[in-house]
Amino acid sequence: MTPRVLLICYYFPPLGGAGVGRPLSLFRLLPAHGLHCDVLTVKPVAYRVFETELLEGLDRSCIHRSGSYDPQRLMYLAGIRKVSDAKIRRAGWLSDRFFPDNKRGWVRRAVQKAKSLMRANEYAAIISTSPPISCHSVAEALVAETGLPWIADFRDYWLSHKIEDTFADRARCERAWKLIDSFKRRAAALTTCNPAIAQYLGSGRTIYNGYDNDLARIWQPPSDRTTVNIGLLGTFDELVPVEPLFQLLAMLRKQSPELFNRIKLLQVGRLDTDWFQAQLHKYQLSGIIQAHGFQSRRRTIEILSVSSLLYISLASTKEQGIVPSRLFDLFASGRPIIAAVPPDSQVAQMIEETQSGCSFDQNSSSELSRAVEFVMEMARKAIDGTLIIDPRPGYARRYTSEAMVEQFVQVIREVTQD
């Protein structure tokens, strides 16, 4: 009989965005390794972005949804379907009000649904992936009753930031660390999506996220040498800085007006339009941008395939340990990467290890100047045809979703070998 794994995740298609990539890859690819996967997730909720196409080709009979009393589910029941990033940020106080997070209202209903699944199926292991941390609370409750091997997977420290940056008071922080310690005692294995999170938790095997190999095959080298397109992939708002790139381009304009006149910006992803336009206006760059907004994953790559360089950024030093999933798509593209990220960040280290681009600290005039020189060099090469762009380059191949799932399979085999 094929061993079955129960995967517990709140964020799963049709919900979209970066957070669904890891659980979706596990669900899609574990069967190729002889492991049947059932997903336990939430019933429809109000959310910022939906990608219904991600459900195409999936065995929906293995996707199980439970009710919830969390705010997003209640908004959906009240008739609200989409919520903006700004609205979600304004509701951030809920994470401090409810413990361990504002998805606490999902736990009891999810546990009930899981017990029903367990009566009908025999599972070899449980995987829970956070955020939200409440996913681990669901798994812990099940493990306390069943004794099943449990893999607790952390895609972030707690939410996006560390415990001490999430909760306002010391008592909540101490309570959070006690909960983490409880997870560590109960779980057969901890996994994290980068080394910084494992170091913060004090344990855990790092399994990086990965790009979709099938989608990555869409990347093509740009053919137009008259224009140098710089691609901006992903969400851009007041929390995801674009100003470092605009500062860079303003400096480049002063140093080489002729080269600057060959540069265009291509934006694909969710966008705070008013904020973005204000930033463009500040640096007098409004005339060089094509903003496409949110697109399907396939269409995103088709649009950005005309780019010669790609840009990524992190908001603050609080995110030094964050590795955005879009970084792996940038690796897959084979384009040089311009990264405005904190010094010694995980992203900066990975770009240096792969020699895939230039990272810089926007607060350092010398590093900003170095980044300008890098962009000028890449732009000149793009124009004269000497910029070599090889989609799915060698350095990116370790970061496929297949490689990620293979590592999870190894962990599953280790915890179930008894």
Image (cartoon, rainbow, N blue to C red):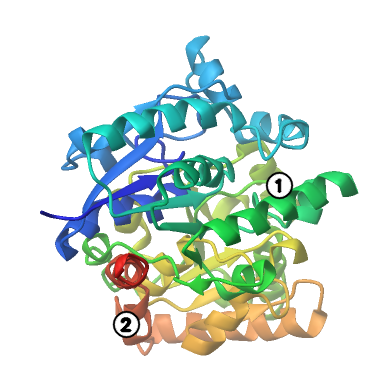
| Place of residue 176 in the rendered image (x, y in percent of width and height, measured from the top left) | 73, 49
Q: Which residue is drawn at 42% across and 68% down?
A: 328
> On the rendered structure, is 407 left or right of 200?
left
Q: Can residue 110 be seen in this view?
A: yes
On screen, residue 152 above or below 203: above
As helix, strand or loop, the secondary structure at mark 2 comes to: loop
Q: Residue furthest left?
A: 1
User: Dot 1 corresponds to which residue?
Assistant: 238
Q: Position of residue 107 (x, y in %)?
A: 53, 32
Looking at the image, residue 371 lies above or below residue 61: below
Tally of numbered tags? 2
Q: How crowded is mark 2: few (under 14 residues within 10 Å), some or many (20 or more)?
A: some
Label 1 crowding class (10 Å Cα cut-off): few <14, some 14-19, many 20+?
some
The disc labelled 1 sits on which kind of residue? Glu
Of mark 2 and mark 1, the one earlier in the sequence is 1
Evaluate if marks 2 and 1 touch, with contact meaning CB atoms under 8 Å apart. Answer: no
Quadrant for residue 163, please give it.
Answer: bottom right
Q: What separation in Å lies between label 2 and label 1 (alpha carbons)? A: 32 Å
Which of the numbered marks, if any, corresponds to residue 393?
2
* Viewer-nearest residue: 233 or 35: 35
Amino acid type at circle 2 is Pro
- The residue that appears at 35% across and 29% down in the rendered structure is 65
* Vertical order, 20 against 105 (above or below): below
Residue nearest the viewer, comparing 193 with 143:
143
| Rendered image quadrant of residue 98 | top right
> Is 68 placed above or below 171 here?
above
- Where is residue 75 drawn, in percent x and y? 55, 17
